[in-house]
Amino acid sequence: MKKIFTLLTICALALMTGCGIGGDNPKPIDTDGGKIKLGMITRLNASEENFDEFMKKVEENLGIRIASHKSIFFDSLNQMQSALQSGQIDEISTYRSVARYMIAKEPRCQVLKDHSLEFIDSFCFALRSDEKELRDSLNMVIKEMQDDGTLGRLTKEYIDDINAETDPPVIELPTFEGAQTIKIAVTGDLPPLDYVGADGKAAGFNTAVLAEIGNRMLKNIELVQVDSGARAAALTSKQVDVVFWAIVPVSEIIPADTDKPDGIELTNPYYKDKIVHIEFKEEKK
């Protein structure tokens, strides 16, 4: 029973993860029966209500109360950080690499030391189901980059070894005259994974990966900044051809299509990261 409880806790909490982009003013949040208010970025195909309903079903099926967190969605990382600092939420759910960057920028934030959640998400590209040729091409390039060590090198250079106190470097995307242009949505809400600078230019890991993909496919890459909550709409409306990040849980107990909208395909993963929770340190009196 203890093992089942642990797995289901992971299952419930792991569905409450993300990061976003938009204004700096957090939306008002009501208290919810003493639950821990957990901030996260708006997902591709889920809502706060979906999460509540999911946890209710888990409780009903097993007769165990595990829903200790209340998910609160935000359309921007700025909004979510402001809500944490003002006490409107108790924690932020994000990734280890993002937490390192956030803490370097705001030392009053800290990773929960007693947070026992050991869960990992895989990052994939999302694209429309009718773009199977493009999906296959991306999968082929991702595999090549994994096999020859390029993805490992870029991860080390732009995530593991980067100075989190400085902004990620801008990288120039290649251009090929007369070649097809692929429009790719970026949000800037998972620095330094998905990062957009104050000047509106994407930088760091995302541009490094996309530049390499453009070079190998001999395609032009055009980056389009969208709100995290608008990623699916931007894709289905053909504003963009590809979304830079979508996530798939690395777990047999959570379906891989948990957050995948109808009509959208996911590529093979290009990066994995562990989920962590961040809290705001209380000031010493």
Image (spheres, rainbow, N blue to C red):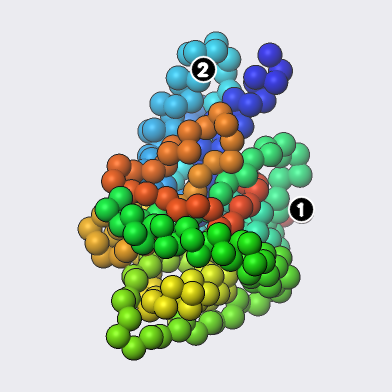
Q: Residue at x 67, y 37 (%)?
A: 117
Image coordinates of residue 33 in percent, x first then y, are 51, 27
Task: Determine whether label 1 and label 2 are within 8 Å by CB.
Answer: no
The local secondary structure at tag 2 comes to helix
Q: Residue at x 38, y 65 (%)?
A: 185
Image coordinates of residue 184 in percent, x first then y, are 38, 67
**Circle 2 is placed at which residue position?**
59
Label number found at residue 40: none
Find residue 66 and report its image quarter: top right
Q: Is residue 32 above or below residue 100?
A: above
Label number found at residue 285: 1
- Which amino acid type corresponds to the residue marked 1 in the rendered image? Lys
- Decide if residue 48 is on the left or right side of residue 33: left
Q: Is residue 121 above or below residue 255?
A: below
- Decide if residue 88 is on the left or right side of residue 25: right
- Decide if residue 3 is on the left or right side of residue 85: right
Mark found first going from the N terminus, 1 or 2: 2
Looking at the image, is mark 1 or mark 2 nearer the viewer? Answer: 2
Furthest toward the top, the residue is 63
Q: Residue at x 34, y 71 (%)?
A: 182
Furthest toward the left, the residue is 237
Mark yes or no: residue 152 visible: yes
| C-alpha distance separating marks 1 and 2 | 41 Å
Image coordinates of residue 49 in percent, x first then y, are 38, 33
Q: Characterize the local packing of mark 1: few (<14), some (14-19) or many (20 or more) Cα atoms within 10 angstroms.
A: few
In depth, the one of 265 and 83 nearer the eye is 265
The local secondary structure at tag 1 comes to loop
Mark yes or no: residue 31 visible: no
Image coordinates of residue 243 in percent, x first then y, are 39, 60
